[in-house]
Amino acid sequence: MHIPDGFFNGATSLGAGVVAAGGLSGALRQSTARLKDRQIPLAGLVAAFVFVLQMINFPVIPGMSGHLLGGALAAILMGPSVGVVVVSVVIVLQALLFADGGVSALGLNLINMAVVTTLSGWFVFRLVRAPLPPTRRAVLGASFVAAMLSVVASAVVFVVEYAIGGVGGVSLTNVLALMAGSHLLIGIGEGFITIAVVGAVLQARPDLVFGAKDLASDGAERLSMRRFWILAGVAAVILLGLTTFASANPDGLMWVAEQTGIGADARASATASSPLSDYGTAGLSGAAGTIVAGGIGIVATFLIGWGALKLVRRRSTA
Amino acid sequence: MSGGHAHALHVHGHSSVHKLPGHLKVAGLLLFVAAVVATPARALWAFGLYAIGLGVVAGLAGIPARFIGKRMLIEVPFLLFALLLPFVGEAPYTSFAGIRISEAGLLAAWTILAKASCGVVASILLAATTEIPEILAGMNRLRVPAAIVAIAGFMVRYLEVISDEMGRMRVAMAARGYEPKMFWQIKALATSAGALFIRSYERGERVYLAMVARGFQGTMPTTDDSPAAAIDIARALAIPALAGIVAVLALVGAR
């Protein structure tokens, strides 16, 4: 998702830079109290952690390997304002030290990968947690949904940006379908990693999880099943709506899929040595063209999330 | 990035490019890339001049072309996307060897190819000729908020430590006969990521305490704030300024 130079026109890049600078300075002001001294080394170490996590790549389609964005994770662990600052530092240094992401597209990359993922992740996290009891399972479930939707939100914002000033003669429907479809898959991976990281930290140092400061002691955890399923239903309806929107022009997407052979071959990514590069998530995205497939994907997502919750829980009670 | 090496892009040297102050080089990079992005895609000659400019800098700095070529691989994913554009773009179409090609898509593909390559090479040249502390000091002098620069400094300092720690955990797992490769084994990796976070965080706490013990007051001391010599400014900004002129000419020519 690191946008290179030239992918967007100059005015859009500049405007995005202004917006990103505004967002970043706002986040910085918010977090100043906490960042004053103690948090600076801490934030630096967490930034290094996010950087290392972003090396985890999973191939999605040829030319698009999803890597962990870590925005939702940073927000849940450090709080939204510090999260924005930390992920922003990662993005800036990737552009300056590693030539990853164009310097002129820095504003766009900051908006997509630092601001939108972190804030939307935090928002969803709070939203999902609000009706649930303060339990470990609620925190983990909210983490999964937040991480997954933060990636989709980032993809949708990319499409909005593309509509404003993207280069290229691709129809928006195609871009939207491609981005939303593939990022739903990336989001599942993101959700998995986020839930497991938050779970592991909750287990060892629960005081470090900013988003679970209110958590009651581990003994009193009960999540009403009815509440869980109602929530899952609402989320599924929202997601299905998104997918329907994404595939409003299924013919176009099908044509793209045919033309480009998306899903036909999983290309070895340039980062073949990264820990997740062998995961075969490619080959699924071609099916995202129809609403039915979208629905199946959503159901599968929830089953997978459910399974992940079960796994984490089994370990914590063992 | 398998090694997770913080200085992966640096090429040690003593050339005139290496010696320029960091903030001038960062500013030069911004100026140059801005010029490239503003250039209309149809002005082929302008991109030729940009390539020559980058070549001159690389030559002065003694950065081998092979090194740059290898590092350019980072833009491959987006270039593949760019190469799809002629086939998925919109009308008007032309045909080439019996394949329908979108003209707008073709132009977009060229735009991305040319501009992204110029940007990546320019960024590589900055990273190759500038030590990380200099880039950070440069950010500081360019009025990037001090907290951001300080966090970036710690991140860079501990990047290798953290990625080595991740590597050690993977080795430990492999030594115990478990090498997760499949998607359903993701939990093992993710829990090590959780452990990694705790180790990172606790290391951060220790670093902070060590700094306080050495008199840390909450702000990092800044070194060398002397104004840049005029000759350095001229050297650092010469090619970006020329690029700016080229971009203006190309814009005028496109009218």
Image: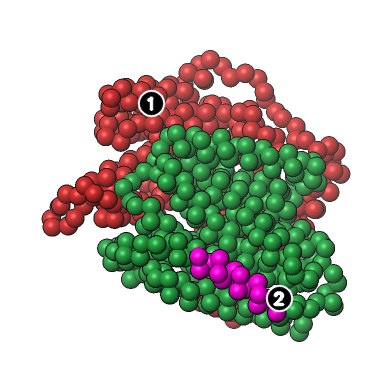
Chain colours: A green, B red
Q: Quadrant of residue A315?
A: bottom right
Any part of residue B58 in sight: no
User: Is B38 placed left or right of A215 in the picture?
Assistant: left
Q: Residue B131, how many percent across, how many down?
A: 57, 38
Q: Residue B245, how many percent across, how many down?
A: 37, 21
Residue placed at 34% from the left, 52% from the top?
A171
- Say which amino acid is labelled 1: Ala
Per the image, label 1 sits on a secondary structure element best described as: helix
Residue placed at 33% from the left, 51% from the top?
A170
Q: Which chain carries label 1?
A: B
Q: Marks 1 and 2, Cα distance to the nearest angstrom?
A: 61 Å
Residue placed at 59% from the left, 54% from the top?
A117
Foreground label between 1 and 2: 2
Q: Residue B247, how many percent across, how many down?
A: 36, 26
Which residue is denoted by mark 1 in the rendering?
B243
- Say which amino acid is labelled 2: Arg
Residue A230 belongs to the span the image colors magenta: yes
Which residue is denoted by mark 2 in the rendering?
A227
Q: Which chain carries label 2?
A: A
Q: Nearer the viewer, residue B65 or B180?
A: B180
- Magenta span: predominant SS is helix
Per the image, label 2 sits on a secondary structure element best described as: helix
User: Is A84 placed left or right of B87 in the picture?
Assistant: right
Any part of residue A235 in sight: yes
Disc 2 residue crowd, few under 14, some 14–19, many 20+, Cα 10 Å:
few
Q: In the rendered image, which quarter contains the C terminus of chain B?
A: top left
Magenta stretch: give its range. Answer: A226-241
